[in-house]
Structures are given as C-alpha cells and as structure tokens.
Image: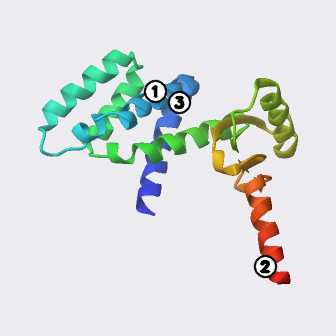
Amino acid sequence: MIEGRLSRRYSKALFQLAREAGEEEQIGSEIDQFFALYNESDLQKVLNNPAFALGARRTILNQVVEGQQLSPLTVKFFSLLLERDRLAHLAGIVSSYRGLLNQAKGRVEAKVVSATGLDTVLAEQLRQQLRSISGKDVVMQEETDEELLGGLLIELEGKVYDGSIRTQLERMKQRIARVY
C-alpha cells in the first residue's frame, strides 16, 4: 500500500514537471527506455546495493543515462531516486506515470493475449473495436500464450474479456461434470 502511494507521488511530481516543460511524451518514453535497461540487466542489483558507495552508484547511473542521452529532467529525476534510495520502486513509478500520461492524452491501455501473434490488419480492427467500447484511443500491448489454444483474452479498463478456447473448454468441462 505504501509502495503504491510512494510510486504515485513520485510519478505525479515528474508528470507535473514534464507537463510544465511540454515534454510529457518524451519523458514517458525516456523512463520506459531506462526501465527496460534497468529491468533486463544487473543494473538494478548494483544501483540498489548499499554495499556500493553512493558516489560509485551515482557515477554508474550518470554513465548509463549519458549513454541513453536522456533529457536533464529525467536525469535529475533518476538521480533523486538514487539519492533517496527509491529506485526499487521504479516499476510502480513507470506504471503510474504511464497511467497519468494516458489519462491526460485521452488514451487507455489494453492488454491483448492470443495463442499466436496478431497480424497487423486484425490488430487494427481489434483496436478500432476497443476504441468503440472505451470511447478513447487504445494503446495495445500484445502478448502470446500458447496455452490459450485460440481466441483472445483482453484486459481493458479493469475488465477482462475472455474469449479463449481454453476457457470455453474449461466451462464445458464444468457443465459436463455437473450433469454426471
């Protein structure tokens, strides 16, 4: 609970500063870019490890953000998180920032899970259908899960639309079990 509040507080502050500078989209993509590197490497182990001196961790962070060519606001933000030992909350901060940005831009995120990847035509048709349901522009995150067997599983605005074959077979199994 506290972690969620903390993440929202930091993301809201960053979003307000980015909005004042007219760079909310850019800052959003920069924190996503840094988070991808941070999450997929040993960077988080080093930057969150108190066994390393703060100066050494600050030097490493500066080298990473310099290599990614991040804006001064983003660099200051990550430096603040490091100084206050808050980089461990980066996943929540990034997620919360993305939510604030989508809300401000009239967008909504949808997670679409299919057994195989969607082709571009089908993905665009689905995006249009989801736009008509939500009344907002839809940013789709596509995932694959072979266990679905077929169909789609969609999460949109807190609701789950499950049209997967796996679920349909499970329901059929339960109905047959009730009869016998």
Residue highlighted by disc 3: 28
Q: CA distance from mark 2 to mark 3?
A: 50 Å
Q: Secondary structure at mark 3?
A: helix
Q: Earlier in the sequence, mark 1 or mark 2?
A: 1
The x, y position of residue 87, in whole percent, is: 33, 42
The residue at which mark 2 appears reads as 177
Q: Nearer the viewer, mark 1 or mark 2?
A: 2
Which quarter shows the C terminus?
bottom right
Q: Mark 1: which secondary structure?
A: helix
Q: Is residue 33 visible?
A: yes
In primary-sequence order, the first of circles 1 and 3 is 3
Neighbor class of circle 2 (other Cα within 10 Å; few <14, some 14-19, many 20+) is few
Image-based side of 141 in relation to 93, left or right: right
Look at the numbered disc 2 and give the secondary structure of its residue.
helix
From the image, state whether disc 1 or disc 3 is nearer to you.
1
Q: Amino acid at mark 1?
A: Gln
Asked whether disc 1 touches disc 3, contact meaning CB atoms under 8 Å apart, the reply is no
Label ID, residue 7: none
Q: Residue at 14% across / 32% down in the picture?
A: 55
Residue 160 seen anywhere in this rendered image of the structure: no
Q: Which sits in the foreground, 80 or 154?
A: 154
Quadrant of image for the N terminus: bottom left
Q: Position of residue 109 (x, y in %)?
A: 68, 41
- The residue type indicated by label 2 comes to Ala
- The residue closer to the viewer here, 60 or 18, is 60
| Distance Cα–Cα, label 1 vs label 3 | 9 Å
Residue drawn at x 82%, y 25% is 121
Report which residue position mark 1 lands on: 33
Type of the residue with mark 3:
Gly
- Picture layout, residue 85 above or below residue 122: below
